[in-house]
Every structure is written in C-alpha cells, then in structure tokens.
Amino acid sequence: MGRLAVGALDEQRWLDVRRFRALHEAGASVSEIARETGLNWRTVKKYLAAGGGEVVPPVRARPARGQLIDVFAHVVDAWLRAELLLKGTVIHERLVEQYGFTGNYQRVKLYLQQARPRIAAELGISPDQLAGLHRRFEVVPGAQAQVDWGDEGGILAHVGIPKVYSFHMVLSYSRDPFCCFTTSQDLAAFWECHRRAFAHFGGVPGVIVYDRTKTVVRRHVAPGEAVPLHPEAVAFAGHYDFDIDVLAAYRPTGKGRVERQVTIVRDHVLAGRAFSSLAELDATFVAWVPQRRAVRHRTHGEIIGVRAVRDHAALRPIPARAYVVADRHLRHVGKDCLVAYAGNLYSVPARRVRHRQLVEIRATAATITIHATVGGLDGATLLATHQRAVGRGARVVDESHWDGLPDGHTRAVTTGDPDGGQPTTRRPARRDGGQGPLQALLNRAAAAQVAVEARPLSVYEQIAAASPFTNRPHLKDVSK
C-alpha cells in the first residue's frame, strides 16, 4: 500500500504525527516515522519541522441544525421568568400536554442548562443564591397541620419493647405541638394517633400535610402525576372533614415545621431521661407542653400559647362518632388453632375452624378481631376478639378456644400383665398433685421395710470364678 500524498491532514492524522515528535527530536528519522504512520515523508517532515507542528488542521464545522425545543424556547423562558426553579420534568410534561411537543426529556434538560443561568442573569439573581433555598408560606388560623414520624429506637428495650416510634402533629399557624408514642406505624396506629391529636387540640385542621407514607399513598407515581390515596385515608379524612395534601417526593422542606418539632421533642422531652412504659412517655410530653407554649417563637414573633388560642378557635369540630380504622389482612389457621399477625399469635375457637382455613384479621390500635371469610347460618363472621399484643413473640390465647381438643386426660398405664389376669390400671398423675403408680409402689416398698440379706465378699468371688466369661483367654481383667 502506497503512502499518502502530501496534503492537509484531518485532526486524527495530525495527532498521530504529533505523537512521534519526541522520537524525531531524539534521533528518529523522518523516513522511519513515515513508515510507522503510513504518510508521505514530505507530509511528516512538514508537520514535524520547527513551527510546522503548530499548524493545526481546520475542523470541519457541521451544518447547523435546528432542535425541536427551539420552537418552544420562548414558552420555556416565560415559565422560567415566572418560576426560575421550575423542574425540567414539569416543563417537559407541560410542553407535551399543552403544545404537542414530541421531543424527549433530555432535549428539555440540555436547553435548561443554558437557559436557566441566562434567565437568572436577566432577573438579577445569582444561581448560587438559589442553592438550598425554598419558598416560605404562611397560613391562617386553623387552616393547616403537618404530620411526621420519629424513630426513637430502643428507648424501652429494657422492659421488653424493642422499638418505639413518636407521632407528631403541629399546627402550622401557631406551631402548637402534639406528640404520642407507639410501637407500630401500621394503618390502625397511624390514624388512631390522629384521633388523639384532634382531642388534644380540640378540633380538626382544614388541611393536613404528609409525605408519601404508605398509610396515606396507595402507590408511588411519576413527578407531576396525581397521587392515588389509600382508601382508608380517604374515608378517615372524609369523616373528620379535612383535606389531604401530599408533598412531592424528596421535598422535606414542605413540612419543615413538624420536622423541626421532632428534634425539639427529643432534646427537651426524651434526652437524659429513662422511661418504663409508653404511658410514661406520653405523660412526660403532656407535662412539657405548657413550657413549649410559653416560648416566644422566633419566626412569627408571638408566644406560641397566645397564637394557639386563635388556632384552636378556628379548628373544625370533632364528629361525635369516632371513625375507627381497621387494618385488614388474610391469614391461615395453624394446626394449633393459632393465627399469626405482626409477629404474634392469636387463638381462634377449634370447633369453628379447620386447619389452613383462611380468616380475616382486623387490627385496630388496641384490639385484634378475627373473622371468617364466609358467614355462618346467622350471617355472623366474628370468631375471636383479643387485646393487641405489644411487641413481638407473644401468644394471646383464650383457653376456651381449645375446648374439645385432646388434652391427655384419657391416657392410662398399667402395672399388671397385659396378656392375662386382671391388670391394675389407673390414669396418669392428676394435675392436683395426686400420686402416680410409680410413686405408690415406692411408697409401699418403703413402708414394708424389706430386709436385705448380708453376704460375705467370698461368696461373690466364688460366683465370679464360676462364671463362663472368666475362662475366656481373650478377656482381660480391666481392673488391673
């Protein structure tokens, strides 16, 4: 293959020649470099010569091509002027929905990388000023509350409760707090804590703000889409007449009032103290609330208790009839007539169930009720009701549920000959401490005081000498 003629090199070929410049300066000839690169020696000499190596080949410019996003640039710029931090996913969604945009999200993202700083400069805003900032909002009395969970860990582990959670609700206008402590974050416990909070405040706020917890949200969706709510959350909110406001994902600043309250309770109520029960934890918080209400809040500048009076007066009334949320699950009945739920076992009547029968558990914050999936002749489905166990590993059993099952009271033993004669039989030892047959025999032997004949040791030596085992040579005296 012949070498390439002298001429202008493309950028890649030019870089190949430049790699050999150090070898040329070290003594490699132009011909050797030409053979390695496959170029004409005159071309190599031209680009390796002093000053020639700085001749950079021109880069061929691609013809400019318009982008789909360019047609909608003026629309995006107008949205950014109204809200500089508007998310790219929201902009792409609105372009598709309102203007029929057919491009993908990456086109929008690339455009925003150059458009956002430009719009910020037009508005006189430095991009660094926006980092870590959020929009502040204020509400009127009674309009809003915020809810969050706190994980308090093993604060009661020494009394057999491995995990404790704190439920927090804060009125947004006054920052008046509520807190209670539970061992579960399930559906029933979550909404039971709401009922206790409403009783604490003396009313119901108009809106309650949540993050995307599974007790409120049925499933997660893409940003910008409507969030489907849990049916029990909808029913509870409808009964108590408040609206549910679910924050966008990864937006903790949207409920910063209650986020801050979780830390305040830990510092002022829990830190440095020891507790022995959930009731003691709740009582300690209630005793601390007057101190909190006497504080002048740094944000709104008023005494929390004074502002809380206006907040409480504007709350909606609590319905006379409570709405009790039950968390429902299907479980199978075990051979021991026990049903497992949340790490604990609960009994059901043996006469009304069978092994592997499917039953429904309805769990509230205080009770566990077990129902048959198919009603009886009278239509009733309730099988059992139990107090809900605290923690895990407990067995909650009603002894009457095992009526009719074998308990061993019919088993019998005999001390006679089972093949002939009249055997003497009796039942096993009674639970009230009565004597069994073996103990009776021992007692009779002790009462008879049987005399044992005393023989000299020589008798036993004669017996041992006459034994056939002592005449076998392969047996050794193990006593030696």
Image (cartoon, helix red, strand yellow):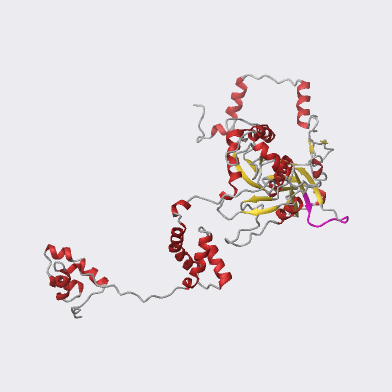
In the image, 221 versus 27, the foreground residue is 221
Height in image: 328 above or below 289?
below
Which quarter of the image is occupied by the N terminus? bottom left
In the image, 478 versus 26, the foreground residue is 26
Q: Is residue 207 left or right of residue 62?
A: right
Height in image: 352 above or below 200?
below
Residue 178 drawn in magenta: no
Q: Is residue 266 left or right of residue 73?
A: right
- Residue in view at x 43 percent, y 75 percent: 66
Residue 149 spot, x, y in % from top left: 62, 45
Q: Is residue 323 left or right of residue 294?
A: right
Residue 109 spot, x, y in % from top left: 47, 64
Q: Is residue 110 visible?
A: yes
- Residue in view at x 76 percent, y 52 percent: 239
Q: Is residue 332 visible?
A: no
Residue 374 drawn in magenta: yes
Q: Main secondary structure of the magenta part?
A: loop
Residue 325 spot, x, y in % from top left: 74, 50
Height in image: 72 above or below 433?
below
- Residue in view at x 81 percent, y 46 percent: 320
Height in image: 94 above or below 338?
below
Asked where in the image residue 394 lies, by quadrant, the reply is top right
Residue 425 spot, x, y in % from top left: 82, 36
**What's drawn in magenta, residue-wise?**
370-378
In the image, 151 versus 379, the foreground residue is 151
